[in-house]
Amino acid sequence: MSNVTPKEKARQIVVAMYNNIGLNAKTSTEQCVFEAKKCAIIAVDYIINEWNSLSGTMNKGAYWMQVRKEVERFAND
């Protein structure tokens, strides 16, 4: 795993999701950020569940749990 902090990783994931949602005349920036956060949480939850089922331990999953918390905090700071 790289030396990326959970906060940095959360931002990377949310921005990636945001870039794929796209803005249109009916969608506000705030709504796009909200949708991107929802998508990021789904992705991180999937990673956590897969990691735990494969490794049988929460050691590495702890990093992803922190990433999930940072996704939830994203744009709320």
Image (tube, helix red, strand yellow):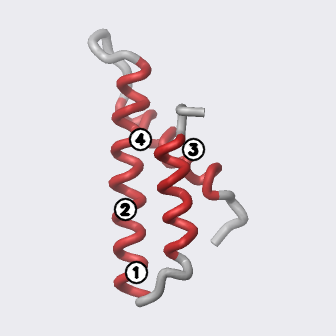
Q: Which residue has dot 3 on it?
A: 11
Real-space Cα separation, disc 2 to disc 4, in angstroms: 12 Å
Amino acid type, mark 1? Asn
39 vs 31: above or below: below
Could you tell me which residue is drawn at 54 percent across and 57 percent down? 67
Query: The residue tagged with tag 2: helix, strand or loop?
Result: helix
The residue where tag 1 is placed is 52
As helix, strand or loop, the secondary structure at mark 1 comes to helix
Badge 1 or badge 3: first in the primary sequence: 3
Quarter occupied by residue 29: top left
Q: What residue would you read off at disc 2?
A: 45
Residue 16 % position (x, y)? 48, 42
Mark 3 vs mark 4, CA separation in Å:
10 Å
Q: Characterize the local packing of mark 2: few (<14), some (14-19) or many (20 or more) Cα atoms within 10 angstroms.
A: some
CA gap, disc 1 and disc 2: 11 Å
Q: Amino acid at mark 2?
A: Asp
Q: Which numbered disc, 2 or 3, marks the residue that appears first in the sequence? A: 3
What residue would you read off at disc 4? Answer: 37
Which part of the image, by quadrant, shows the C terminus? top right
Q: Amino acid at mark 3?
A: Arg
Find residue 45 and report its image quarter: bottom left
Does residue 38 appear left or right of residue 4 in this picture?
A: left
User: Secondary structure beneath disc 4?
Assistant: helix
Q: Position of residue 30 (x, y in %)?
A: 42, 22
Farthest residue toward the left? Answer: 26
Q: Position of residue 11 (x, y in %)?
A: 57, 44
For label 1, count other residues whose C-alpha is less than 10 Å away and answer few (under 14), some (14-19) or many (20+): some
N-term mark: 1 or 2: 2
Q: Residue at x 36, y 75 (%)?
A: 50
Q: CA distance from mark 2 to mark 3?
A: 16 Å
The mark that comes first in sequence, 4 or 1, is 4
Quadrant, the N terminus: bottom right
